[in-house]
Image (cartoon, coloured by chain):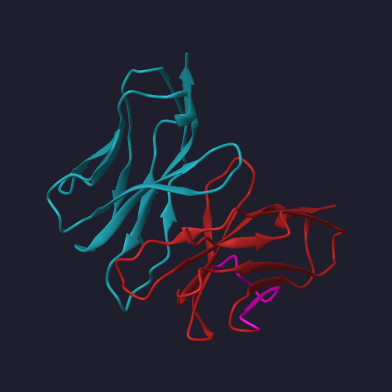
């Protein structure tokens, strides 16, 4: 069974600085998707960024980028130029890409990010 | 921009009562999901639904739970006899046909069982 591990329960960053959130996962599959979701105090789950495992290039979305290391099964999220609005819980998630297999999201335990002015 | 909606935003019920949580997925989506998040814990998969039947369910999704798409637009989660431990945030999600499509989440329903 696949598992997702986020080893940092809490992180903090100064506004305008850069922070990296860690995520590792375990799977025997070769084709899958990885996601970072943001959950602000409103508790809505918002997709931040996604990565397809077959792509070697790391995904980027504006100030958000990932460092995807497939062999190491590592998927970290880098937030550049941090803003106060980035303060939230961040969840790493895994999803199989095999069509006949499950397509449920498997979430990590989350990292709470605080942003200080 | 299309979005997933959920009602109610907060439901309070007595232990043993039945509750129905409602979701309206994005209109052209075909895959539907329920997840739950107990306060302070991670988000857990409950069930996926496609073509009017359950595709997969987790161990949490026991006989007390059921899902239905009663009218082609709503997607409901019913808990027949609520327990204290059912208190959680329940999220509905939906996605389009292609396997690479992402799941879009609704804002959640906070269920409190007293």
Q: Main secondary structure of the magenta part?
A: loop
Residue at the extreme front: B1
Question: Is residue A28 in view?
Answer: no
Relative to B17, is A24 above or below?
Answer: above
| Viewer-closest of A62 and A102 | A62
Q: Quadrant of residue B74?
A: bottom right
Relative to A60, is B106 above or below?
Answer: below
The percent position of residue B109, horizontal first and vertical second, equals 68, 56
Left or right of residue B80: residue B72: left
Measuring 85% from the left and 52% from the top, which residue is drawn there? B114
Q: Quadrant of residue B72?
A: bottom right
| Viewer-closest of B31 and A105 | B31
Question: Is residue A110 in view?
Answer: yes
| Viewer-closest of A93 and B104 | B104
Measuring 42% from the left and 56% from the top, which residue is drawn there? A106
Magenta span covers which residues? Answer: B58-70
- The red-tinted chain is B
Left or right of residue A96: residue B71: right
The percent position of residue A76, horizontal first and vertical second, equals 28, 38
- The cyan-tinted chain is A
Measuring 29% from the left and 52% from the top, which residue is drawn there? A26
Left or right of residue A102: residue A46: right
The percent position of residue B34, horizontal first and vertical second, equals 56, 65
């Amino acid at each position: 069974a696949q598992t997702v591990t986020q080893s940092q329960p809490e992180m903090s960053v100064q506004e305008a600085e850069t922070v990296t959130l860690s995520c590792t996962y375990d799977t025997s599959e070769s084709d899958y998707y990885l996601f970072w979701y943001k959950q602000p105090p409103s508790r809505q789950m918002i997709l931040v960024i996604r990565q397809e495992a077959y792509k070697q290039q790391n995904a980027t979305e504006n100030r958000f980028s990932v460092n995807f290391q497939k062999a190491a099964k590592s998927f970290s999220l880098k937030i550049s130029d941090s803003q106060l609005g980035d303060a939230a819980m961040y969840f790493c998630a895994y999803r199989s890409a095999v069509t006949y297999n499950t397509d449920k999201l498997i979430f990590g335990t989350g990292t709470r990010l605080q942003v200080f002015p | 921009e299309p979005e997933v909606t959920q009602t109610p935003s907060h439901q309070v019920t007595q232990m043993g009562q039945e509750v129905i949580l409602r979701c309206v997925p994005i209109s052209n989506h075909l895959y539907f999901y329920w997840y739950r998040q107990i306060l302070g814990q991670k988000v857990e998969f409950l069930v996926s639904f496609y073509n009017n039947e359950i595709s997969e369910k987790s161990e949490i999704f026991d006989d007390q739970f059921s899902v239905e798409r009663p009218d082609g637009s709503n997607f409901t989660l019913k808990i027949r006899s609520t327990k204290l431990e059912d208190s959680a945030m329940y999220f509905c999600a939906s996605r389009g046909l292609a396997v690479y499509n992402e799941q879009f989440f609704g804002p959640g329903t906070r269920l409190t069982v007293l």
